[in-house]
Image (tube, rainbow, N blue to C red):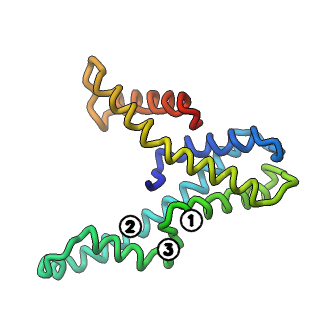
Amino acid sequence: MRIKLHHTPYISKRITRDLVNCSFVEVRKEKSSIEVEIERIIDADIEKEFDLDEKVETILDEQEEEIENLNADRRQLFWMTKKRLANDFGVILNNEDRFSDIAHQILDFLWEEDYIHYTCSDNQVKNIIFSSIDEFMKGFEQADSAVLTKLKSYKRKLIPGTEDYDLVYHRLYEEELIKRGLI
């Protein structure tokens, strides 16, 4: 599953919480500033993938007539083109490798900017960050399904995309994440 922009505040809270609670990590700055920086790093990674997706769409749009003439599957062409251009955009498509790369970026930044200090190996701290991301993403689908079920059972009908819907969704979503120990 891909990390989405609305996940990043929750993932950054989870990573920060796990680092703060880790016995071999000394936190040297406020939790909120750590969360902001982690969110920025993850958002930058997501933006790279958005740029890649836009480029692929542009390429396929330019070839639309030929795609239709050949009766080709646009989704398959999208994926093949995306795989071919991923390295040029610095996007890692394999989730495990991507989460590991993001964990390295976060660790490097937090260490270099003196947000955290540790006396163990880099890999141990990176594994804490990686696990936080991985566990969040695994639990996300379950939490999202539970929230959608709750929204369907509301007496007043909420329309997806409206401000009311978004407010209620995010409140319920955060409650589900807390209940599941994801943040």
Identify the residue at image location x=50%, y=27%. 175
Residue picked out by circle 2: 53
Identify the residue at image location x=62%, y=40%. 13
Q: Is residue 174 above or below residue 140?
A: above
The tag earlier along the polypeptide, 1 or 3, is: 3
The tag earlier along the polypeptide, 3 or 2, is: 2
Q: Residues within 10 Å of mark 1 (few under 14, many from 20)?
A: few
Q: Which mark is residue 8?
A: none
Q: CA distance from mark 1 to mark 3?
A: 15 Å
Classify residue 151 by image quadrant: top left
Image x and y of residue 140, in percent:
47, 42
Image x and y of residue 112, in percent:
79, 60
Which of label 2 and label 1 is nearer to you?
1
Q: Is residue 143 above or below residue 116?
A: above
Quadrant (top left, top right, bottom left, bottom right) of the C terminus: top right
Quadrant (top left, top right, bottom left, bottom right) of the N terminus: bottom left
**Residue at the left extreme?**
69
Residue picked out by circle 3: 89
Q: Is residue 124 above or below residue 60?
A: above
Classify residue 124 by image quadrant: bottom right
Identify the residue at image location x=46%, y=64%. 49
Residue type at tag 1: Asp
Image x and y of residue 148, in percent:
34, 33
**Residue 55 or residue 136, whichever sits in front:** 136
Residue type at tag 2: Asp
Q: CA distance from mark 3 to mark 2?
A: 10 Å
Residue picked out by circle 1: 97
